[in-house]
Amino acid sequence: MVIMNRRQTIPKHLRYTIMDFNRQFPDDDACLEHLKEQRFPGGVAFCEKCKQEQKHHRVKGRPVYGCDVCLNQISPMAGTIFEHSSTSLRLWYYAMYLMASTRCGISAKQIQRETGVTYKTAWRMFRQIRSLLSESDMQLEGEAVEMDETYYGGTRKYGAGRPMRGDRKKTPIVGMAERKGRVVALVAPDIKGSTLLGYVREHILPKTMIFTDEYVSYDGIKHMPAGYRHRRIKHSAHVYVRGNVHTNTIEGFWSLVKRGIGGVYHQVSQKYLQSYLNEYSFRYNRRDQGNLIFTSVLRRVAELAAPHAEGLAQMKPAPTDAF
Ligand SMILES: [Zn+2]
């Protein structure tokens, strides 16, 4: 098996190879046990029947845990992206592992080839996993934040790339990036000043120095009440770096996304573009963390599980075909 684009620069203690994955998650039971520990550490969870926290034990032959006192059953999969799925839990874990381990993304086609699930199933799995990766409430800070826009569905060259009026094919994407830090990338309805300044207000800490190019929609940044400072680089005059004034960080992120979407996914519909941006941002924001990216994805599953959904296990049978 080939894991594409796996970076070799990750320190040894942060490496997590396919061997490590196979060792930690040899089968569905190991994955279920892991999921249970994420959601109900030590098997302790609120029991709907006892009306209090109780310890739960694994029920043999079913992917559920029973209350030690009243035997009422809870399912670690209830309320998660795995609920209602007939795909094995281990395959889900493997898909998450793949998504976390590549730099440029992983195609549904590849997991179809490797595991034999249908393309549709693989595509749906990735869509579900991506749905966990949004960081839309992130606030950027630091010495400087770079801001830039790009377009999906067309190429942009400096000074010539902004779409013309009536050019509907290009979808604007706005990005903000800390130097050597985190990134936020958003599919934008347009690139008017009001839209861009709204993103500044929402995602950049007050008083931060913001670097942009000379595009007119950024004009208002220095007049915003939050006291942002603003420096611009004249791309139209073919100046790309002046001292520390540049937007190379966010542009580097754009090229990563474009290489990935172009090379791995080939084409992404506008409807799902944001979820792909979330995937790239999620990995980029943890790019030095090696195996912790996979851990972060796993943690998201539990964090974003519908609250108290474990009670659902009483009402309908848990999916047993996965086990
Ligand atoms: Zn109970």
Image (cartoon, helix red, strand yellow):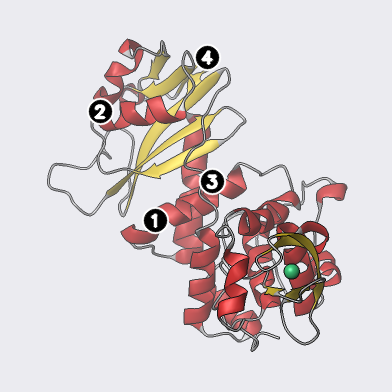
Q: Position of residue 258 (x, y in %)?
A: 45, 52
- Nearest the viewer among 302 and 191 is 302
Task: Name the N-terminal-most of marks 4 and 3.
Answer: 4
**Which numbered disc, 2 or 4, marks the residue closer to the eye?**
2
Q: Amino acid at mark 4?
A: Gly
Tag 2 near tag 4, CB within 8 Å: no
**On residue 193, which mark appears?**
none
Q: How far apart are the alpha carbons under marks 2 and 4? A: 29 Å
Rendered image: mark on residue 273: 1
Which residue appears at 28% of the width and 17% of the height?
A: 220
Report the amino acid beneath label 1.
Leu
* Circle 1: element type: helix
Q: Which mark is residue 281?
A: 3
**Distance of mark 3 from mark 1, alpha carbons?**
12 Å
* Mark 3 or mark 1: whose residue is earlier in sequence: 1
Q: CA distance from mark 4 to mark 3?
A: 27 Å
